[in-house]
Amino acid sequence: MKVSVFSGIVVYFRSVFQGVSSIARACFTAFPYLFRVGEFRKEVTEGYPDPVSSKTADDLPPRTRGLLFNEIDRCTGCRACEKVCPAQCIRMEEEPGADASKIWVSVFDIDFSRCIFCGLCVEACQPSSLIHTKQYEGAAYELTDLVASFGRGQVTPEQRAKWAALRQMSENDEVSL
Amino acid sequence: MSSSPAWVSAWLDAWGISAGLPEWVSASISVAALFLLILVPSATLISYLDRKLSADFQARVGPNRAGPAGLFQPLADLLKLLQKETRREWSWKENLWLIIHTMALYSTLAVIPLGSLALMVDTEMSAFLPFWSALVLALGTMLLGLGQGSVPGWFGGIRVAAQTLAGCFPALIALLCAGMRTGSFRWSVLASSQGFMPWQWTCFSNPFQLIALMVFVMSGLVLLEISPLDGGHSMSDIHGGVASHLYGRRFSLFNFGRFYGFFFWSVITVVLFLGAWNLPYHLVERLKDWGAVRLLGILELLLILTKTFFVMLLVVWVARVSPRSRVDQITDFAWKVLSPFSLVALVGASIWAGWRAFQ
């Protein structure tokens, strides 16, 4: 289809006019923001870390996957979290405790430099000792400070021997019963 | 060849330094003073205002931590950039090139018209001399990119050269339009042909001069790769092109060179089209009667800097509300829209000037 010279010129001038007017319209949309009229008075961004508008832990939704916390009294040392973790950031050591039913979790380290906060460990935890807190500020100056330890601490060999004796005694009691 | 600028001798006399200094000393002093006292503070102020105004347009806060309301942000940026380590030490050849390039770029500080007294080089062709800076900037950027030896550098360098070429033609034609009105390209004649009031400015004297002003500003954006027409070295497909291998001090110098181009373009826009440094006539006469030469110089400087900053912030405003164009769209725009309009403005302005001349 042959386009006439006249319509070509018209199209040219119309496109120039449209370009100029679109830029002008875009510029005028900035006026309400510049002069803070009506609903544009407030910024739409969070003012973190200024307390004016940034979110505290209470503002976050209830299922927020924040930093992890392990209630070591409920932890059974089943290692379900360690096995399911995709980043392999949980390290634990456990041994039989004083009571036959209780496991002494001596070391329970979560390396937050590797944790991806996926929540699979919390889902896998049977006694629900491992939970997400709503804390999200976990920055540290040293890499080693990023490891959170929830373990109860190493046990001396004497203590271990005492516990073994205690367990033996309670087993004998059960057998005799 | 004109003598050393009157403002330098006025200040030196006031401080009691003998005026028997050779010309090259006073010229060097004035260039260094212009750089340190005008250019660097302007860069600081414009970068701060740019960030704060952009934040206002975009419903954000902008810098607010470095100093009250973020006023020390440019200083913080400068200190950060100065202490960043470079990826590769430059050889002596590259450093020599950098020295020569910098000298060539900032040599046009001698031609920047910042007041009736601050005119070091006031010749018949003064208005064309700042183009030297623009072309040096473009050539240097292109060489920087080509010398990088990597794909972003090659493509970035060639794109910068293409965009500069596209912007040069309409810019020069629009410049001719401004000179058409006064018949000369001397800064002093261009400035004295305008007045303080807006209706006495060149751009409002006839509609073709208004077109010439628009074309001049837009072709300057194309020529010097200023946002939103900075496609030459900001396209994401080459990771920013020429500047992708610059860190720390080199990066800040590179951007300062770009700012210098933006700054002098705005200054000559104001001088050519927007009334230059003209204060109200009676004020000028009163100050001259009192012999307050330095005060007159300072007031003219403040007026021209205010107008310059207004032009620069207008460009920043348009940049923040518009998306970037691709580099080939920019060159298309320059060749297919700006050049024809600049020629129309030239023809119209010459007919207008010739009409009046033959009355």
Image (cartoon, rainbow, N blue to C red):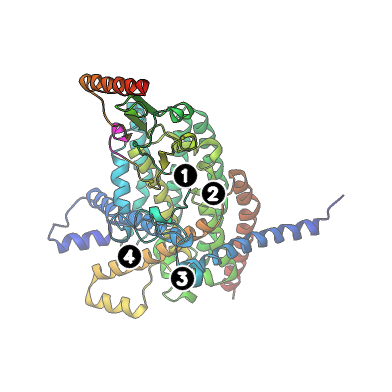
Q: Which residue is mark 2?
A: B168
- Residue lying furthest right: A1
Q: Chain of mark 2?
A: B
C-beta proximity under 8 Å, tags 4 and 2:
no
Amino acid at dot 4: Leu
Q: Chain of mark 1?
A: B
In-front residue for pair A144/B65: A144
Q: Which residue is mark 4?
A: B301
Q: Position of residue B358 (x, y in %)?
A: 59, 72
Q: Position of residue A163 (x, y in %)?
A: 26, 23
Q: Which residue is mark 1?
A: B135
Q: Quadrant of the C terminus of chain A?
A: top left
CA gap between label 3 and label 2 equals: 37 Å
Amino acid at dot 1: Leu
Q: Which residue is mark 3?
A: A35
CA gap between label 4 and label 1 equals: 26 Å
Element carrying mark 1? helix
